Amino acid sequence: MIQRICSGSLDGIDGFEVVVEVDAGRGLPSFQLVGLPSTAVRESRERVLSALRNSGLAWPKGRVVVNLTPADVEKRGPSVDLAIAVGVCGVTERAEPGARGDAVLLGELSLDGALRPVRGLLAIVTAAAATGRRLFVVPLGQAREAALVPEVTILAASTLADVVRWRAGRGCLETIVPASPAPCRREPSPSLLAFLAHAPARARRLAVLAAAGRHDLLLVGPPGSGKTQLSRVVGTLQPALAAPEALEVARIHGAAGLLSSPELDLRRPFRSPHHTATRAGLLGGGASLRPGEVTLAHHGILFLDELSEFSPGVLDALREPLEEGRIAVVRGAGVRFWPANVQLLAAMNPCRCGWHGSRRRECRCSERLRLAHRSRLSGPLLDRIDLFAELEEPEDPLRGDVIGDPGRIWELAVADAEAGHARLAGRSRARPTSLAEARRSLDASAAALLETAGASLGMTVRSSMRCAGVARTLAALGGRTRANRDDVVEALSFRREQLAVLA
Ligand SMILES: [Zn+2]
């Protein structure tokens, strides 16, 4: 009798269901695996054979054929080991699994029959649940991760023998109850608290504004002006994720093998790739079909320090996630879209040597070199950034204007960012998608002002839209439903057209 067992595999960041069919017949003992298995899956023959023997389970005497369907999609990774072994056992014992035959079995086998974790388990369970599967057997160590998926029953198993006994109705497996996520936020380090307490009021305002509206931000300034620290403040002030967003983030990080805890983490991701990162590393895809930094930063922050040092091709490709919240990943002849709803925080030096405009050192760049430095960032990319600010080095970093207890200053900033974010509720990005929508968030005099200022500063339509989006967040921070002239004036002060170093 043919055994059919449901399992799953991972393709990029998405899971898909795999049905394992096992048949045994007369003939010389052999084991054939068909249905586009990758190398890792082809090697499952050896693992399954050893695991069965070391678990005291019988191996069929004749010829065994294992077919993985759908046959036209490559199965990567050893997640189907458990289903193959249980299927082989089933044909040997001529088992009738009954109701338990509907369970989805997932797990890699070690040679002694123990179940090992599977990369991308959350993505695989999510995909199978979407097709109506409700019962899953997974490795014990990963059971709490799988239980994050709503409306499924997760059973945890330690060994192949446990699963075989359970399937034959001779034993029980532990049912895992999902834990509800604890509200959490990133805690500021002492140095970050001190930095915010000493920062100028305008820098504090900028951090709250960027965090509340998830606005893309470019900071320009010489070394030591606090660009990285201010970006970290924005990352730490971020409002918490909603549970479905957190689940999506966990699914992506699990597929990349980066899930560190089985708890649902409501903190937004903060990714800071180095400027030497490859195109595939940043944007995703490549031979391994792994998510890139833009996808790992989905719903969170992508921090690019030394922005002008990234390759121009990579920077231009960032326009898509900044505009659409997704990235196209080419695979073979096809294209797929992966989520990349990122908030870009970027920092750069004002010139090649870094000291242009500094009080401490003299810039040694020629005018031509300075122009070349800033021209590495294309106009279309800059147009898609909401906020620009030039930071100056403090005269003495620890003797700025402190107005009270650093902890209290931090709490106020957190409260402001959260209140502003809540008033913008319902928008995953605080950015209008058309000029008409942008104008609706401004009152009449504010709209007139933006139009006049846009014309005199030579702002593009996209730049004006971004400016209106910032004004809308400023209005939300002030408790107003529509932005007024003051909000537009303040939003304009953060536009690049006002920044000598980029204009
Ligand atoms: Zn210079």
Image (tube, helix red, strand yellow):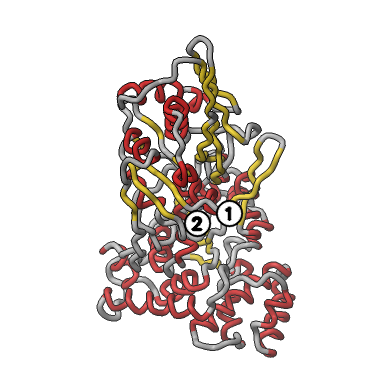
Badge 2 element: helix
Q: CA distance from mark 2 to mark 1?
A: 9 Å
Residue 60: name its quadrant. top left
Q: Amino acid at mark 2?
A: Glu
Q: Residue furthest top?
A: 28
Residue 321: name its quadrant. bottom right
Give the residue drawn at x 60%, y 61%: 502
Q: Amino acid at mark 1?
A: Pro
**Residue 306: horizontal and vertical position, in percent?**
49, 50
**Residue 204: horizontal and vertical position, in percent?**
41, 73
Give the residue drawn at x 44%, y 70%: 207
- Asked if 392 appears above or below 60 in the picture, the reply is below
Looking at the image, tell me whether mark 2 or mark 1 is earlier in sequence order: 2
Q: Which residue is mark 1?
A: 339
The answer to whether residue 451 is visible is yes
Q: Quadrant of the C terminus?
A: bottom right
- Asked if 6 appears above or below 360 in the picture, the reply is above
Q: Which mark is residue 248?
A: 2
Tell me if label 2 and label 1 are in contact, CB under 8 Å: yes
Whether the residue under disc 2 has CB within 8 Å of ligand 1: no
**Residue 142: horizontal and vertical position, in percent?**
36, 46
Give the residue drawn at x 36%, y 38%: 163
Task: Pick whichever, 441 or 225, lies toward us.
Answer: 441
The answer to whether residue 347 is visible is no
Q: Is residue 389 left or right of residue 382?
A: left
